[in-house]
Image: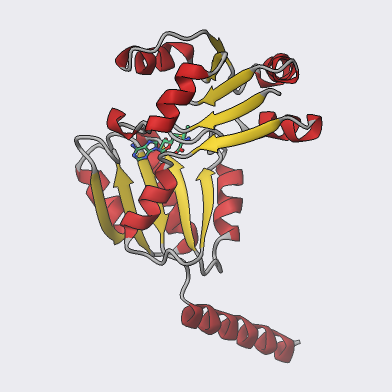
């Protein structure tokens, strides 16, 4: 029977491709890649010659059907994205769902996911966390999501591109006030850097220097005690208003 392999690939350091990932990429019938040119570089580095097809955000519906058909005919297919774990802020979810519906076996070859590295390197609570991925581009939608995080007590993780970092830090500060934030960039790469500061400090830092590389932003959750204090203040405000009418 056919099988789909979600194969995690490096997020910078090529040594992070696991032995099992390597063997899987070598033995499957073909590789479905987010960007075949990008994945070709990885394959060339490891001396793998393998048929590829593109599977990305914009063709995932039609291409997904084709891949599913191949899987149903007994083929073994590896799905890779440009970096990290497929399905995490990358295509994958839809194909996995189709496989489940069609009764096709799916397995995953584990490897890096930037959010997990950012989380464990942050020094913030790892016990409970939420992942928001990329904030929407549109201002209103971004604000709405940030507002929904005001009372969040879990650690919150975001992905961000360098050219949007300044705006994102400012929007966070505007909606959430000053909070502890850890910026983890270029993980596993030569210029890996993890800085722990607060939003005001981060805004100041990037007023002095240009954001460079890929970032995971790790925001401290609201502490239970300040959440209680805020709720109390809201309640007092409400009862005061009631009193006035
Ligand atoms: N599938 C990937 C994963 O498992 O992490 C994420 C893909 S998403 C399109 C790309 C984003 O992940 C980047 O904009 C950045 O926020 C984050 N990212 C990827 N590689 C990173 C790295 N080496 N260091 C820090 N963040 C990284």
Quarter of the rendered image showing ligand 1 = top left
Is 128 or 198 nearer to us in this picture?
128
Tell me if 139 is positioned left or right of 163 in this view: right
Task: Say which quadrant the C terminus sits in.
Answer: bottom right
Q: Give the x, y percent position of residue 80.
A: 51, 25
Q: Give the x, y percent position of residue 62.
A: 72, 15
Position of residue 177 relative to residue 138, above or below, is below
Is 235 or 16 nearer to us in this picture?
16
Q: Give the x, y percent position of residue 230.
A: 54, 79
Tell me if 177 is positioned left or right of 123 in this view: right
In this view, which residue lies farthest toward the front? 1
Position of residue 130 relative to residue 224, above or below, is above
Residue 154 appears in the rendering: yes
In this view, which residue lies farthest toward the bottom? 243
Number of labels in the image equals 0
Residue 91 appears in the rendering: no
Task: Say which quadrant the N terminus sits in.
Answer: top right
Residue 182, by quadrant, is bottom left
Q: Give the x, y percent position of residue 66.
A: 71, 13
Residue 192, by quadrant, is top left
Position of residue 111 relative to residue 71, above or below, is below
Residue 179, by quadrant, is bottom left
Is 41 or 211 nearer to us in this picture?
41
Is 151 or 104 nearer to us in this picture?
104
Q: Residue at x 52, y 8 (%)?
A: 51
The colour mode here is secondary structure
Q: Residue at x 60, y 36 (%)?
A: 107
């Amino acid at each position: 029977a056919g099988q789909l392999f979600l194969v995690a690939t490096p997020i910078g350091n090529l040594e992070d491709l696991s032995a099992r990932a390597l063997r899987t990429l070598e033995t499957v019938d073909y590789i479905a890649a987010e960007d075949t040119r990008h994945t070709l570089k990885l394959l060339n580095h490891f001396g793998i010659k393998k048929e590829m097809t593109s599977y990305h955000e914009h063709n995932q519906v039609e291409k997904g059907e084709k891949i599913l058909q191949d899987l149903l005919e007994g083929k073994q297919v590896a799905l890779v994205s440009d970096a990290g774990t497929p399905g995490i802020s990358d295509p994958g979810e839809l194909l996995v769902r189709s496989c489940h519906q069609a009764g096709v076996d799916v397995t995953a070859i584990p490897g890096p996911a930037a959010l997990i590295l950012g989380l464990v390197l942050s020094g913030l609570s790892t016990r409970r966390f939420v992942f928001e991925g990329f904030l929407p581009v549109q201002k209103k939608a971004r604000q709405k999501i940030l507002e929904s995080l005001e009372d969040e007590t879990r650690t919150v993780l975001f992905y961000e591109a360098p050219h949007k970092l300044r705006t994102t830090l400012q929007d966070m500060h505007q909606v959430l006030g000053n909070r502890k934030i850890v910026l983890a960039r270029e993980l596993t790469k030569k210029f890996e850097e993890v800085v722990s500061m607060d939003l005001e400090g981060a805004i100041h830092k990037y007023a002095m220097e240009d954001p460079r590389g890929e970032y995971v932003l790790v925001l401290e959750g609201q502490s239970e005690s300040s959440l209680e204090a805020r709720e109390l203040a809201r309640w007092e405000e409400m009862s005061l208003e009631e009193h006035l009418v």
